Amino acid sequence: MTLLAVEGVDARHGLLQAVRGVSLELAEGETLALVGANGAGKTTLLRTIAGAHRPSAGRVLFEGRDITSSPAHKRVRAGITLVPEGRRLFTNLTVEENLGLAARAGRGGPWTVEAVFETFPMLEPLRRRRAGRLSGGEQQATAIGRALMTNPRVLLLDEVSLGLAPVAVEGVYASLRSLIERGTTILLVEQDLGRALSVADRVACMLEGRIVLEGAAAEMTREQVVEAYFGLSRGRRNGGPA
Amino acid sequence: MSTNGTPLLAAHGVRKRFGALVVLHDVDFALGAGEAVGIVGPNGAGKTTLLNVLSGALQATAGTVRFRDADVTPTGPDGRCRLGIARAHQVPKPFGGMTVFENVFVAATAGGGHKRKDAYRRSIEALETCRMLDGANRRAETLGLLDRKRLELARSLATDPVVLLLDEIGGGLTDAEADVLVETIRELKERGIAIVWIEHIVHVLVQVVTRLVCMDAGRVIADGDPDTVMADAAVIDAYLGSAA
Amino acid sequence: MNWLDQVIQGILLGGYYAILASGLALLFGVMRVINLAHGDLAILGAFLALVLTDHGVDVWVSLAVVLPVMAAGGGLLYLGVLERSLRSGVLVPLLSTFGLAIVIENLLFEKFGADQRSFFSSIGTLAYSSWQVTSQITIGKLDVIILCTAIGVLGGLQIFLSRTSLGRAMRATAEDPDTAELVGVNSRAVYAMATALALATAALAGVFLGMRQTFDPYAGQAQLIFAFEAVVIGGMTLWGTLVGGIVLGIAQTVGNQMVAEGWLKDVWGGAGAGHVVFLVVLAGRLIYGALEERGGVRTVLGRA
């Protein structure tokens, strides 16, 4: 059953056309990894799905309903939550307050503050610490925990491994796997292709605002992705250097 | 590498720190006269920082920048512009309240050091080369993205540059627009202007540059022929993470 | 000059300034809006109460109507004016609130004329009754009530912001409205609520003003300046507003007395002393900030 669908979405970023005619479908329980170079439009696409960004064309559908004009906080209440790029914790609030705030979305579900501490045990002793004083890995765990507190049906993750030590990244991906096992639908943007392929059911590659490659992760080769990632064959078709 | 004798623009042993964060570790870079070099690499590699050090917008923490074999390390960006190093920005910033012509005129007089009639002529030439002459009397803030980028190029051209530094100028354009931009940059190259171009959209880059430098985490990890560099495992790993 | 008495009077005056300034600080802290209509909104609240007292309602009872009405007005002010102003850039809210100030002043003038008004008759003896603490020191009962209310208001706001769910949402939205939306906070509702609170506290201050002294449609201008000064002196924190109010109050009362006794030339009276203190604190903050940017006082001195 298609849970989330994006149809022909165009999104601008200032004067730049960041997303061009993107269409995607996400089935319930599926994990889709979005890869691509910087500036390819991945973050803008995720923000458009989350409602933080208005598309200039196209629709976003959730459970078959058109939510394109719905503001972000309403989408959270409906069950779509984004863990934004760069964590974006509320630095003046404690870990516990950051988590508690997200619970206001009022969806109810298995995720509570205690459940988050169980999944991220290193956060428990930090519960009263202000979010601004955490390390990168702790912040990332808090950001994911905060998103989980909204008990989402679709979790959008934007570059959760960025700026983290490898050990911390391992921890983050371990908790992602447990989420997947619970049946959460996930759309994640990931720079590291190896990790993306290891955790996703499907992979899509974006280049200059378009999806240039899409398919099952198990069937995709690294070479295919590299080719799509840089689009080099396009360059050679247009003629090499003068 | 293809420099004959002394490079036109060279950075040697450049280090740049922002507080405790080291963004550039001992970077060497050389540009020959008339050469077109592309700089690629994942986000946070230090590409824009290197460009800023070359253009004078940032002072390196250590290392030197030499232009025509003279030390320009202490010179600021306006000084370097007058020497012949021009720079176009990622997000074009035209002088909004002025017309296209006026934008270029300011560059011709201040950066190019031309006077009156000369500056006039120079501005018109620059606009012609960048195919912006038709819209010369339009106010800069009414321009669309491609035109803004071409205006950046025209402005740079009016300062009589010998080196043009481009920072991700290809982003956000449609295929057709990107083709137009590539044409314009090719024309600048044909006039003998050396180009250093940071770009994410590699397939646009390789249509103009003859050499590619790849950076990752503040260091140069590859430098050479574009095909070879893009096939280099270290380069692919830098972007996509190590092959499992 | 009886310093102690003047300082005590200044502290009590500070209580009034704290209530007045709290709304201004709140709007700036949550939305980065400098509400140039703040003083006039306080006076608007006072005139609303006046309408009720003119019909025989006790002024304290009138608060039960004035505060909710002004709060509702705050919500409308946000949705109707501030929201669009904020979208248009940083300076637009300054312009729109400035325009609002002028509109309020002129509307009040048209409706109520230039006469000085007050609530003296409504509060009866409270207007002047006091405790004689020593032969030198008298403490007005009304002033004490105002100071206690100020502590109550600030304390209430503190509890609201730190302990309640809505307060937390407000703090989060103040820091990062974009991300707040992404975790389910309705940022529009939060902003409307903050504006409502700001107007309610302003109205409360306006009514207290009318109990202490007379007011007219243009009294808001001076009150805006005092509120602004109290916020800057005390810093942007909640309790800083109380500190700032008290410092300003003391500066004004002491300044007034010094003018009366001939120590100071009368330039603007006591308010002048307040302005001087404000400017000194402002200069101090700016210099401190500039030094911090260059690495701190020690670094700068070390280089000199």
Image: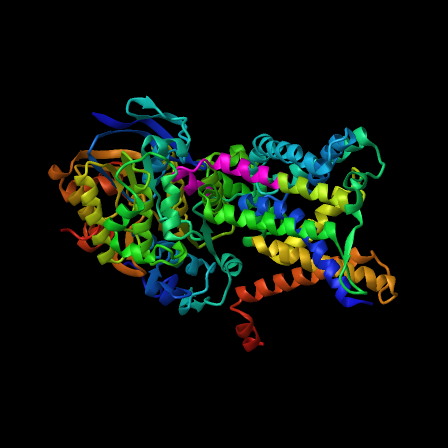
Q: Is residue B137 visible?
A: no
Q: Is residue C33 visible?
A: yes
- Viewer-side residue, B216 vs C71: C71
Query: Magenta region's main secondary structure?
Result: helix
To which quarter of the image does residue A152 belong? top left
Q: Residue at x 21, y 42 (%)?
A: A179
Measured as percent of width and height from the top left, residue B228 is found at 20, 52
Q: Considering the image in quadrants, where does the N terminus of chain B appear?
A: bottom left
User: Outermost residue, left direction?
Assistant: A219
Q: For residue A81: magenta?
A: no
Rendered position, C82 above or below B89:
above
Expressed as whole percent of the image width and height from the top left, the position of residue C114 reads: 84, 36
Q: Position of residue C104 (x, y in %)?
A: 73, 34
A130 versus A104 height, above or below: below
* Residue toward you, B24 or C56: C56
Q: Nearer the viewer, residue B164 or B175?
A: B175
In-image side of C238 versus B200 (left or right): right
Instruction: Provide residue B68's location: percent of width, then percent of height.
Output: 42, 64
Residue occupying the point 67% across, 52% down: C147
Q: Is residue C64 above or below residue B52?
A: above
Q: Residue at x 58, y 48 (%)?
A: B106
User: In the image, is C174 to the left or to the right of C220?
Assistant: left
Within the image, what quadrant is residue B103 found in?
top right
Decide whether residue C178 is among the magenta residues.
Answer: yes
The region drawn magenta spans C176-199
